[in-house]
Amino acid sequence: MLKENTWTLAEEKKISDEWHKKEPYRLDRKEKIYSIDTPPPYVNAPIHMGHAVVYIYMDFFARYKRMKGFSVLFPLGLDRNGLPIELAAEKKFGIRAEQVGREKFLEMCKKILEEASNESVKTFARLGISFSSYKFGEKIGQAYETDSESYRRLSQETFIDLWEKGLVYEASKVVNYCPGCRTTIADAEVAYEERETEIYHIKFKVEQDKDIIIATTRPELLAACATILFNPEDKRYKKLAGKHAITPLYEKEVRIKAHPIAKSDFGSGILMMCSFGDLTDIRFFRDEGLKAHILIGIDGKMNKNAGFLEGMYVKQARKEIVAKLKEKGLLVKTENLQQRAPICERSKDPIEFIALEEYYLKQLEFKEKMLQVAHKIKFYDESSRQILIDWINGLSEDWPLSRRRYYATPIPIWKCKKCGEKIIGKKGKYWQPWREAPEKKCKCGGELEGETRVFDTWFDSSISPHYILGYGRDAGFFKKSFPCTLRPQGKEIVRTWLYYTLLRIWQLEKKSAFEDIWIHYHILDAQGRKMAKSVGNVIDPQKIIEKFGSEALRFWAAIEGNIIKQDLRCSEERIAAESKTLNKLWNISKFVSSFKAGGRAKLCEADKLMIAHMDSLIKFADKEYSGYNFFEPAVKVRHFLWEIFASHYLELVKGRAYNGEGKFSKEEQAGAIFTLNYCLEKMLLLLAPIVPAITEKIFSDIYDKNVHEQEFPKVGKSEKAGSAGRGAKAKIESLLAVNSFVWKTKREKQLSLKAPLKEIVLPKEHENLHGLVEDLKAAHSAEKISFSSAKEIQIRF
RNA sequence: GGGCCCGUGGUCUAGCGGUUAUGACGCCACCUUCACAUGGUGGAGAUCAGAGGUUCGAUUCCUCUCGGGCCCACCA
């Protein structure tokens, strides 16, 4: 019996606090393990609405799987690695990392992290997310941080494995270089931005021929011009094939060639190929076997190859050379151009292409394997698979792993100063080669120099399933639980987090890292815009929770739309509406629990009908939940709750359940009460993963059990439903139609809904309500209900 | 340039060969009906983006166009 009149936010908070404190969802390590590789949110900002909703979904999965008898590994992780922390430290202390020295800078980063609030964790707890634990530690299921020693040690250990398999090499190649971050970045970290730039038309001399005009956006790279290209179809330039042009200012002879890469209708239709203006150029040089002249150094300044531009930053150099060309009359014209320029995904700086020595992880030779994995794994939604396939197909270079940064996992390598031999650290320890010596010595006895570079943070992130499954920490559990069951993540990080993880786990285990991949879209603001700090439209889930509660937010998240197929708009109005649903559920429960259950029950047809309907709902929900679809079942259960159960069935059997006038037998009364409870109990079970707090409260008050420890309902035995099962849907439709008609008629006659009726005559189409006659009589205070061949329902007063 | 997703009442959504085209929010009218006014009942509101095609029949399948979003790519 429910005592309280309403469901309150205070009660909701009490329950989530309890979960937070008591760890009721601790991993119990039974036979069937279900593991979720949660995406650790970044700690430097509190989580926003998008995180909240995605974690709510993951919580649906976790809670459902527990009800299905799985031991669910659902870890809380926090991402604390990488550049954003460093940038925050540089900003706060007004320094540059390389000025203060490594040791000191790392301390500054730690300071920033100490100040990072644990608001995110609080929000998760308040949302009722059933993490295996909220306590931080190394044990399986405990909360973890990506900069912890044990996480970084694992990163290094897996690197050592890959090194020993011969999959890592060091090489000097042209890389994507971010001048802002002062490090190499991988293709996966390159983004693009539409920008306005200027394109300069420059005069080149040609041997024994008239000058040609070449258009370029990168005049400062003139010294690196290696060849000049025109389209083979282009009649204007055909005669120049094989001749040589002289670069202006630098007076270098370069060959003129026909090549399909040149588009006749762009610029002047003839272009200079320099090392390196963009990714195209890099591939061209590689394909043609041309020797590159690198003009830009690691400091972002022009080097001595650039001649008179030496020492200038790129921007400045461009200005300088344009002025010089103009002065000499070599600049024909300048135009504006919309250009898609490669930028660094994190710092948004334009990428430069320079030659650097870096460590690479082989990935090109795994393309076929990766495609096979991509085809084999189950994707929810299926259409997201293509994103991964496209990315794999487009790979053209191995993965540069090393970064010239600080707050990240160090590369556990030492180099012998004498013989150049590379010594790799031993497993079982977290190594910091820049400050300590390895256990081994070089064979030649030479002095060892510790590596100062660190790993790409994706190298850390891509080991998350191994970390959570206890690889290297708990061999027994790892063996039992690998591969990880589910990877839930956003579609924008398919090319990074998902791809890199699949690659690395394949290289280590020769198996797919996951069974299922759940790819979600995003939460937009009420106007359908992306949430962004700069727009100021970021919705704080804490504010929503304060106003409407986490249960309303959770219910809304389930029914707003299908997040694996489209973006969801966040609407306070609709979230508010779901707190009404919670209230409705509360009141229904209060009503049902006001009847004393028990005694021999005889099920009337209306009861069988409801049970049959409830069972079909259970079947549907079970099937859909197991495919990560909570949207449609939630909508259906919600509809059942409001319409079929509350408005119609409840009104129909109220009379029988009260049985004040003794019109029904005790058994029939008990039948109504049994069915009310049957439906309520099953509804609570179906809703438990979605709205865990209110269902827990109601379930324990009425049934004296913890709803989250129950098995997911199985479809009731068919004899209960009996013949009502057949045509149940049509019967329910008839019932709804008849009730509506009677209510409408009474209202039109300005009668109370309880006003007595002499007779209701039902037409042929509602003949299927035969078995419900007694309940209908009671519900509408009708003396008699009969059937005729008429088309319409008739009512006699 | 290529690929993927999406265009259904004011807003958001279901349907995916035959429905009087779901449902929610909002709107209007009436109602203290004993679980609930965070309620009840009723109502207005949709040429299912546009044009072709396949079909006896298309919101549902195909093609194209327009509009929105995302991803990839070698336009200097």
Image (tube, rainbow, N blue to C red):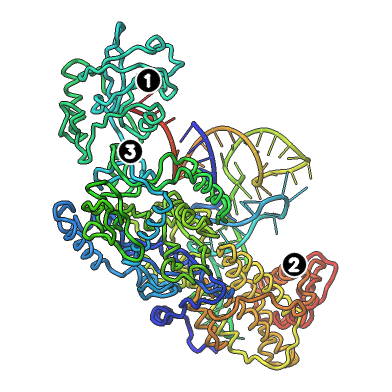
Q: Earlier in the sequence, mark 3 or mark 2?
A: 3
Disc 1 designates what residue? A229
Task: Give residue A333's quadrant in the image.
Answer: top left
Q: Nearer the viewer, residue A246 or A114?
A: A246
Q: Residue at point 39% right, 46% down?
A: A399
- Which residue type does callout 3 highlight? Lys
Q: Nearer the viewer, residue A697 or A101?
A: A101
> Same chain, marks 2 and 1?
yes
Q: Position of residue A277 (x, y in %)?
A: 31, 31
Q: Residue at point 27% right, 46% down?
A: A420
Identify the disc placed on residue A582: none
Q: Label 3 neighbourhood size at 10 Å, few (<14), some (14-19), many (20+)?
A: some
Please say if B61 is above or below A702: above
Disc 3 designates what residue? A173
Q: Nearer the viewer, residue A242 or A657?
A: A242
- Can I make out residue A527 in this image? no
Q: Label 2 neighbourhood size at 10 Å, few (<14), some (14-19), many (20+)?
A: some
